Image (cartoon, rainbow, N blue to C red):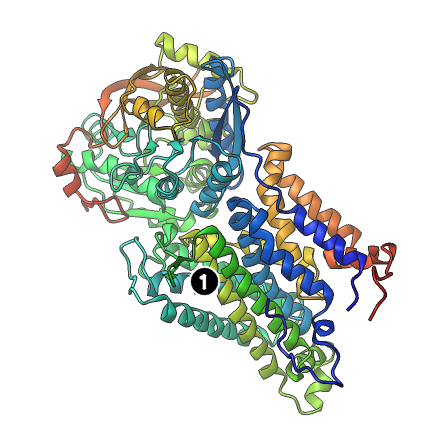
Amino acid sequence: MTMSLQSTPGATQPNWLDKIGAGHIFLGIALVLYPLVASDFFLTQIGGYSLIFGMLGLSLMMLAGYGGMVSLAQITVAGIAAYCIAIFGDNNSHLLGFGWPWWIAAPVAILIAAIASSLIGWISVRTEGIYTIMITLAIATATFYFAQQNYAIFNGHSGYAGVRAPAFWGVNWRDPKPFYYLCLGFSVLAYASILYGSRSTFGLTLQAIRDNPRRMRALGFNVTAHKVFAWFLAGITGGMAGVLLVWFNGRVSPGTIGVDAAIDVLIIAVIGGLRHPIGPFLGALVVVLMQTFAIDLVGAERFNTLIGLVFLVIVFISPDGILGLWAKFKPNFSQESLRPGL
Amino acid sequence: MRMHRRTLLALALASGLTAPSLALAADDTIKIGLLATFEGPFTVLGEDSERGAMTAVEEVAGTVAGKKIEIVKGSSDASPDSAVRAARKLVEQDGVKVLIGPLSGDEGLAVKDYAKTQPTVTFLNGASAAQDTTFRDPAPNFFRFGTDGAQWMAGLGTYAFKDKGYKTVATVAEDYSFPYTQVFGFMAEFCKAGGHVPSKSWVPIGNKDFSSVIAAIPDSVDAIYVALGGADAVNFLTQYQQSGGAAPLIGGSITVDQTVLTAKGKLRDVLVGTPSAGPTADTNDTPSWTKFVEAYKKQPGAFPSPSLFAHAYYINMKAALLGLDKVGGDVSDGGAKLRETLSSLSFETPTGKVSLDKNRNAIADIFLTEVTENADGTLLNKLIKVVPQVNQTLGIAEADFTALGAVSRDNPSCP
């Protein structure tokens, strides 16, 4: 695990282990060892998929939690990256498919997604609160319908199939274990960058803008530019998730970027909690587990009701999602160290 | 470094998520996956599919070759992604060796591609009826005992041109592979007979407002061919009736299906007299069909007559059960024996004999029908004529049929 982005050990510095935190180290070890005990299904369909949607939720959490901008267009950004991979790389839908190698296609796809995200941000930064939600929802819906009815670029309702994850260094990266580690690697990168970035000058400025944009403007900060840059960064995270998503599914179609999916991302972020970057990953795990196994619990007729009820209960008990639940119950777990503290 | 108890708790929680799959079925049960649309725009159709499949299971009292049948359900929302996700869960987590499904066209194409990666699992189609699920680039372990959307149209094009006297027809259909296949099947005959199709409208699934589509239909056409399903068909027909549309209709197989005919409202008025074709006919009075209808009606929430989705899932489930019975419920060889048995399986269904071609696609009877009002006010598909043993190339030599090209929005064309 490479959690230590600022490992500058020195006598005056706190121990780097302390900086990372015991929680992170244990979580990291657990995630790295997870493939030893998990079946292939739990590895990719639950593990990998949760990490991908966790990253999507993370890009929303970053905008909403630090920037105060709730976006419903994160799945659209991911979808743009996914479509780019299908168009620039190979597909078997007999349309476009330029056959670029992955190491060009993937960065270009992520960059295009980030630019698209900046554009969405640029359109919506002048609005606040519910209006941002409305504008981004409109963009997500419009993109969905455009993709569904455009045959020259998006290939209509069927979209693109036969998109393969790259194979290099003798590893097929869509095999369960490599794919899980690929998702884990990208997730850790996104998570650590956002955690670090939130304490950087830019991160603090963004949070200050969230709290009082007028004062920040009076102090001489370019509020719009900061917000748009936040959208660009969120677009990189969303784009990475989109690339992984299309490698995961092997296909992309308008259904991938529909309004349902857009709302799923919002649910993931809200269920998880918007206060800390770990929230979206927790939320994604709960949502993916529910969506996968609810049908086994209550049968085919009412499983969506059960999913809805669970989400309702979580938000009802704790408006701050699972993170809030944790904060609520934490005092109940004793805080004594298991061994005398350092 | 502090190590708190909560850290350990988190660790314990995390390790709980690794629960290895408990896919080991007991020896005396056989797990069969049932994949259908239990959510989204085709929910009603998905629920009726389940009734059809369960009718076949109850026919054998829930046991095959002395083993108990366990049905594991998976749900999709008619999008290919969700179908593959649900199929993965059934195969990789629940460990089913036989999977029945999915329901709709693009789902079938996606699940066929997935089937290629799971050679030890036997896939039987549900009601998905896109042509290329089996015709081009088929998967060796994917079987379709129901016929495809073009086969379902057998006889309709000729009937519309010759008996009804329609010379020009506009089409309105959903914008994905199954309606393409239906329009292909209709036009293959209709254009050959000398008819013209000057306008084709493709609408997205789940479309609510059809006013622009209705306005775009040319006034000069003799009839409108409608291939929409479920809520889309109800919405279009209601709005067409309200807009004072007078042109007679020709129905795609699922447009005048029981899932639509049982809908309330004035759309009934425009439906009566609509010719259609499909794998079933409500007024079929052969004993095997009436027996099937009686068995079907025992299912909770059943329609007055089984929809073609119930029929397709019934046929495929029945084929799976017959195959499993012949191999003694033994799929320990990765299902090789079962697939061999299925390939040569030929059996009597409520709608006549079914056998498979070399692409594992069904050859079966197709029914030409017309919507009529029953004495009790319900709408039914009256049987006009049976087109016997239609194959996937609609009786055209395979090379010539392949030369017609893959079905798409623009193929075929006869403006």
Q: Considering depth in this image, is A32 or B223 the residue closer to the camera?
A: A32
Image point (37%, 43%), residue name: B117
Quadrant location of the N terminus of chain B? bottom right
Q: Quadrant of residue B123?
A: top left
Residue at the far bottom: name it. Answer: A220
Q: Can the viewer see residue B194 in this picture? A: no
- In the rendered image, residue B63, in percent from the top left (x then y), is placed at 50, 15
Query: Of helix, strand and loop, which one carries label 1?
Result: helix
- For residue A57, above or below residue B17: below
Q: Nearer the viewer, residue A60 or B198?
A: A60
In the image, taking residue B170 as reference, residue B121 lies left or right, namely: right
Q: Residue at x 38, y 63 (%)?
A: A169
Residue at 85% across / 55% down in the picture? A333
Crowding at dot 1, Cα within 10 Å, few <14 / some 14-19 / many 20+, comes out as: many
Read off the chain for label 1: A
Res B106 quadrant in image: top left
Is A49 situated above or below B221? below
**Can I make out residue B33 in this image?**
yes
Q: How many marks?
A: 1
Q: Quadrant of residue A112?
A: bottom left
Identify the amino acid type marked 1. Val
Image coords of residue A33 (percent x, y):
59, 55
- Left or right of residue B70, residue A165 in this image: left
Q: Would residue B300 appear left or right of B400 to someone viewing this image? A: right
Q: Observer-nearest residue: A270 or B253?
A: A270
| B386 horizontally vs B316: left or right | left
Determine which residue is flagged by label 1. Answer: A243
Residue A73, how many percent across, how many down?
A: 54, 63
A167 w.r.t. B341: above or below: below
